């Protein structure tokens, strides 16, 4: 079995437990300025929230609510992680 097939299987397995299964997808891709409250409420009780968020972060998902976070909130996390990676690089160069 190749790696791609494994990734797809893992991805599919967490998505099967998603709280948003059967929920209108439009809820998770609100118009600009529209409320994200309802989508976030669905995500709040989702057992695969972490998997969903990591998937979105790893794949650079730019639109919609993933793992209970908006585009802007995910951007903040990506920026924060990039800063942490840069700080670690600096530390290892000066050590
Ligand atoms: S965290 Fe939200 S968007 Fe992600 S799988 Fe769960 S309910 Fe769906």
Image (tube, rainbow, N blue to C red):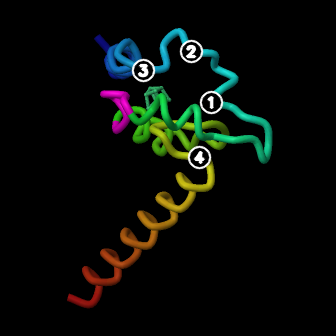
Residue that badge 1 annotates: 28
Q: Nearer the viewer, mark 4 or mark 2?
A: 2
The kind of secondary structure element at disc 4 is loop
Question: Would you say the beta carbon of the disc 3 residue lies within 8 angstroms of ligand 1?
Answer: yes
The kind of secondary structure element at disc 2 is loop
Q: Position of residue 78 (x, y in %)?
A: 49, 58
- Tags 2 and 3 in contact by the CB under 8 Å rule? yes
Q: Quadrant of residue 11?
A: top left
Q: Position of residue 90 (x, y in %)?
A: 34, 83
Q: Residues under labels 1 and 3: Cα distance?
A: 12 Å
Residue that badge 4 annotates: 70
The chief SS type of the magenta part is loop
Residue that badge 3 annotates: 19
The kind of secondary structure element at disc 1 is helix
- Tags 2 and 1 in contact by the CB under 8 Å rule? yes
Question: Would you say the beta carbon of the disc 2 residue lies within 8 angstroms of ligand 1?
Answer: yes
Residue that badge 2 annotates: 23
Q: Tell me which segment is drawn in magenta.
A: 45-50
Q: Residues under labels 2 and 1: Cα distance?
A: 9 Å
Nearest the eye: 51 or 46: 46
Q: Residues under labels 4 and 2: Cα distance?
A: 17 Å
């Amino acid at each position: 079995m190749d790696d791609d097939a494994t990734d797809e299987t893992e991805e599919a397995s967490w998505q099967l437990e998603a709280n948003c299964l059967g929920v209108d997808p439009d809820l998770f891709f609100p118009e600009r300025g529209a409320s994200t409250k309802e989508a976030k409420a669905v995500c709040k009780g989702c057992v695969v929230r972490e998997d969903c968020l990591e998937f979105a972060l790893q794949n650079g998902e730019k639109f919609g609510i993933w793992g209970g976070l908006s585009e802007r909130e995910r951007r903040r996390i990506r920026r924060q992680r990039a800063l942490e990676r840069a700080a670690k690089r600096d530390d290892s160069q000066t050590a």
